[in-house]
């Protein structure tokens, strides 16, 4: 039987991979299409291990993402907290859905997170209101979710006993 600490290490290492994917440089034309890697990893681990990964984990993951991206402290933490709360509220239903159906909810959560983040940046004066091209990241996140779900599920089944 694997220990609880071992479970956390698997989750933390996978989240570290999400951070790397979130900050890897992309060409200007691809920046709007960058998937929300950390959001998807938090969504998966909160759904898969709701009694081990929860709101505190999402908040800490968001604060670290704020530091890495250089955004207003608490911005990503708030959006990931909302995603984790919705995921925790629906985790039993979500586990019954196939990855295509889950990507529909992930699309909605990504749109909410991106919209909220953009709105907070505008009202704080960090950016000017621009077109809605920043929402393309939600569609790319939903498109790659089935493949990422399969990968994370195989990692969880290989390393973690529920």
Image (cartoon, rainbow, N blue to C red):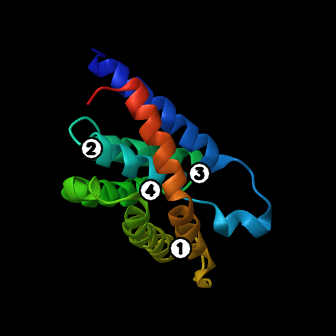
Location of mark 1 (residue): 125
> Contact, CB < 8 Å: mark 2 with mark 1?
no
**Disc 4 packing (10 Å; few <14; some 14–19; many ≥20):** many
Is residue 92 rendered to the left or right of residue 94?
left
Closest to the observer, 19 or 124: 19
Pick the quarter of the image with the C terminus. top left
Q: Position of residue 43 (x, y in %)?
A: 38, 52
Location of mark 2 (residue): 54
Point out the tag, 2 or 4, that comes first from the N-terminus. Answer: 2
Closest to the observer, 121 or 37: 37
Q: Is residue 27 visible?
A: yes
Look at the picture and state if 84 lies above or below 138.
above
Location of mark 3 (residue): 69
Point out the tag, 1 or 4, that comes first from the N-terminus. Answer: 4
Of the numbered discs in the image, which one, if any, rests on residue 77? none
Location of mark 4 (residue): 76
Asked which secondary structure carries label 1, the reply is: loop
Asked which secondary structure carries label 4, the reply is: helix
Point out the tag, 3 or 1, that comes first from the N-terminus. Answer: 3
- The structure residue drawn at horizontal position 43% and vertical position 64%, both measured from the top left corner, is 100
Q: CA distance from mark 4 to mark 3?
A: 9 Å
Point out the tag, 2 or 1, that comes first from the N-terminus. Answer: 2
Q: CA distance from mark 2 to mark 1?
A: 31 Å
Q: Say which quarter of the image contains residue 54.
A: top left
Point out the tag, 3 or 2, that comes first from the N-terminus. Answer: 2
Q: From the viewer's perspective, is the residue at label 1 or at label 4 nearer?
A: 4
Asked which secondary structure carries label 3, the reply is: helix
Q: Position of residue 129 (x, y in %)?
A: 57, 83
**Disc 2 packing (10 Å; few <14; some 14–19; many ≥20):** many
> Contact, CB < 8 Å: mark 1 with mark 4?
no
Q: Is residue 66 visible?
A: no
């Amino acid at each position: 039987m694997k220990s609880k600490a071992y479970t956390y290490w698997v989750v933390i290492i996978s989240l570290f991979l999400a951070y790397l994917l979130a900050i890897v440089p992309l060409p200007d034309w691809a920046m709007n299409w960058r998937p929300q890697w950390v959001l998807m990893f938090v969504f998966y681990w909160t759904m898969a291990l709701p009694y081990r990964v929860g709101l505190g984990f999402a908040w800490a993951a968001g604060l670290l993402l704020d530091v890495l991206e250089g955004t207003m402290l608490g911005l990503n933490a708030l959006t990931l907290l909302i995603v984790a709360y919705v995921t925790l509220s629906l985790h039993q239903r979500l586990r019954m859905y196939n990855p295509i159906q889950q990507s529909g909810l992930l699309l909605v959560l990504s749109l909410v997170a991106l919209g909220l983040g953009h709105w907070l940046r505008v009202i704080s004066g960090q950016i000017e209101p621009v077109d809605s091209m920043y929402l393309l990241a939600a569609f790319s996140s939903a498109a790659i979710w089935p493949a990422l779900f399969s990968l994370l599920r195989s990692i969880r089944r290989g390393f973690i006993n529920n």
